[in-house]
Amino acid sequence: MRKFYKSILPLACLSATLLVGCDQGGSNQPDSASSDERSVPHLEKRGQATQLIVDGKPFLVLGGELHNSSATNAAYLRPLLPRLDTMHLNTVLAAVTWELTEPEKGKYDFSLVDSILTQARANHLHVALLWFGTWKNGLSHYVPAWMKTDYKTYPRMHIKGGYPVESISPLCAEALKADAGAFAALMDHVKTIDAQHTVVMMQVENEVGLLGDSRDRGPEAEKAWAAAVPAELISYLQKNKGKLLPETDKLWAANGYQTQGTWAQVFGNTPQAEEAFMAWNYSHYVNSVAAAGKAKYALPMFVNTWIVQPDDKGPGDYPAGGPQAHVHDFWRAGGSAIDLLTPDVYLDKFDEIAQLYSRNGNSLFVPESKADEKGAANAFFLIGAYKAIGFSPFGIDDRIKDAVKDPVPQAFDVLQQLSPEILEAQSTGKIAGIWLNTEKPTQSVTLGNYRFDVAIRTNRDGSEKHDAGYGLIIQKGPDEFIIAGKYLQINFVPQTAGPQYVGYSLLDEGKYVNGQWTPGRRLNGDDIMLDYHIAQQAAIKKTGSVVRTLGDKPSIMRVKLYRFE
């Protein structure tokens, strides 16, 4: 039997204007928060990292996102989740669709949400729920049928040529009111049924933005484009002048840093200005939905991004106005209830994308990525190099059949073992991430008193070749380090005064069992020697030995160094 609930909408959120004023929570819990409030999953700055706190402890999300329709039927989902637990995931990302949540206007059905949480708990999994509300991949495919068919009340956007597209306008106050009401009802229900804190994060909408044009050209959008730029946005720009992203500064500077006027007068009459207009309106809308939900239950909330692709010529080729890295200022100005702006990354230049999305104080989480060898490498690199909250490849249900040999479960096995060490090292800044490939076959990082010169693993005659290598390094003491990853080979170079030659007083491979290090083999001899041309090596202050991650899947080693002369 379906369970129906009456519409729940905060009185303070009855209009698009008032929605912005709803309690917006935040990423840090105030000192005055009660112990009950602090037990709710939240983001917290701990040392040098912003971390997800679950039941009072830092939590590293090793997630997997299900296909869009996998969680829309309880019977279909039931056999999937037990297998995910064996794949070393600790979190499943599952969609909650508006069309199934509110099949009749004002009546809510949360039976699928209940099923997701019940099955997740039975399989030792946490959950991030993905709200497929007004938009999914830029389109309004998941809104209820009563909204789809009433395009007069819930108008679609129009693009050049006057054509309508199947995407509700972010300037539609009625759609916003309905979406915020449904999301608030969802959050109220989650708070009621989830004393166990199974749900740790919420995604609000999915890959928003307009496809086919750089801005909406419907009647309400035309009025807004011709109206004055909102004072709230101008205030943000003025307050942050000198600290704005370079793309924002360039756009604002083009017309002389105007502080009043229409969008064209302040930012120009260009596709980039039109994209900024859409970014403001999307952020305002999504923020209002998030704020309505936080007023009921203040879980961390993120929005995900369909990022710019190599062949895209301009906004509209990718979803214009979505939280692209170059419009984050507009999302920050309009989205104070949104905790994380997250990229969905399927492209190869992961380092460049991570750098762009870590600007503007944005902590990193990747809710969608490749679920292959590159995805495994991305996870290690993001968590080590950018102190990320977590990582989640998409379509994880596709990987179940070959879970034993699959690179993502193999990577998550190591990352799960190391989670306590990783979280501590993120907060102290004593962690680094490595991602090598044919375009970048070497990398150098410095931790403590040593520089690590890292290359893709080879052997003495150079016949062993690999296309990539990845991993992370954690400093445990002045001369002691954890090295984890695949196909890595490392030389150590002192960065302080004293003896400049480095040897290994011990090098062990092993595992963490229930959080405790359990040594395996003591590595030496052929397993560390790379070059027996000792005179040549000594002349360049090397010994001919290296640390190598062995085998064909990620492994963990602990090394203790000594210096001599």
Image (cartoon, grey):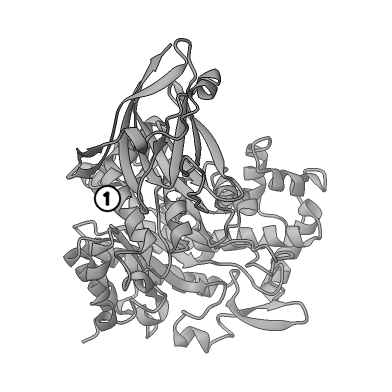
Residue 395: x, y in percent? 41, 70
Residue nearer the viewer, 479 or 428: 479
The residue tagged 1 is 40
Instruction: Count neighbours of disc 1 (C-alpha within 10 A) and say few if under 14, some if 14 to 19, many if 20 or more.
Output: many
Taking the image as shown, residue 525 lies to the left or right of residue 287, namely left
As drawn, the residue found furthest toward the bottom would be 149
Amino acid type of the residue that numbered disc 1 sits on in the rendered structure: Val
Residue 3, compared with residue 329, is above or below; it is below
Residue nearer the viewer, 405 or 40: 405
Residue nearer the viewer, 187 or 316: 316
Residue 390 seen from this side: yes
How many numbered marks, from 0 up?
Answer: 1
The residue located at (42%, 21%) in the rendering is: 502
Residue 372: x, y in percent? 44, 63
Residue 206: x, y in percent? 49, 67
The residue located at (63%, 38%) in the rendering is: 240
- Circle 1: element type: loop
The residue located at (47%, 63%) in the rendering is: 370
Residue 36: x, y in percent? 21, 47
Residue 13 seen from this side: no
Residue 234, compared with residue 474, is above or below; it is below
Quick one: quadrant of the C terminus?
top left
Q: Quadrant of residue 297?
A: bottom left
Residue 224, compared with residue 299, is above or below; it is below
Taking the image as shown, residue 326 lies to the left or right of residue 547, namely right
Taking the image as shown, residue 165 lies to the left or right of residue 110, namely right
Quick one: quadrant of the N terminus?
bottom left
The residue located at (50%, 46%) in the rendering is: 435
